[in-house]
Image: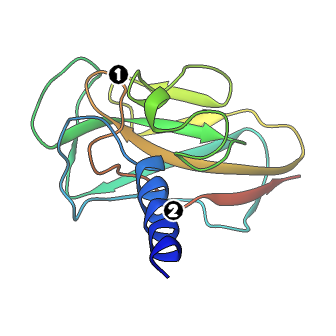
Amino acid sequence: MTRLFATIAAGILAASAAIAGGETPSNPDAELYFVNLEDGATVSSPVQVIFGLRGMGVAPAGAEVENTGHHHLFINRPPLGEGEFGAEELELGIPADENHVHFGGGQTETTIELPPGEHTLQLVLGDAGHVPHSTPIVSDVITITVE
């Protein structure tokens, strides 16, 4: 029984570490969401994406202002903390590539070209150094279909 409890506890700790962020504190009540897109939406390309944030502010990358961050858009990748990189890699900063788009200028919307088919999107707030906050502020993952 003790061994079962230890195994369950280790699993819980590993799961919570997978979504851990960096050292910058966040407002635990903050919310990140898509303003104009819903899960299951059918859209045309180019796709306008408007970012919504409650409980924190937006500041450009490099600006160390309390309770602020800047947006990152994850396209067609597993949710934050899963997949090809986890907590240790995220402490180095969110990568910049076609699946991880940075908005370090403090932008709150974008227009992206996507080919026809299903695509997943997730918003992730990053601190001054592109690292998710100590309690990561992320949107739900949504799936859209581009016609």
Give coordinates of residue 22: x percent, y percent: 30, 35
Residue toward you, 130 or 42 = 130
**At numbered mark 1, what does the secondary structure look like: helix, strand or loop?**
loop
Closer to the chain start, of discs 2 and 1, is 2
Q: Residue at x 38, y 28 (%)?
A: 91
How far apart marks 2 and 1 lie (CA) works out to 38 Å
Give coordinates of residue 59: x percent, y percent: 23, 31
Residue toward you, 103 or 24 = 24
**Relative to 42, 72 lies left or right:** left
Is residue 57 placed above or below 24 in the rendered structure?
below
Q: Residue furthest front?
A: 2
Q: Residue at x 53, y 35 (%)?
A: 110
Q: Residue furthest bottom?
A: 1
- Which residue type carries mark 1? Gly
Which residue has dot 1 on it? 105
Is residue 99 placed above or below 18 in the rendered structure?
above
Q: Nearer the viewer, mark 2 or mark 1?
A: 2
Dot 1, crowdedness within 10 Å: few (<14), some or many (≥20)? few
**At numbered mark 2, what does the secondary structure look like: helix, strand or loop?**
helix
Q: Which numbered disc covers residue 11?
A: 2
Give coordinates of residue 35: x percent, y percent: 47, 59
Q: How is the image coloured?
A: rainbow
Give coordinates of residue 109: x percent, y percent: 47, 39
Q: Which numbered disc covers residue 42?
A: none
Q: Residue at x 45, y 65 (%)?
A: 12
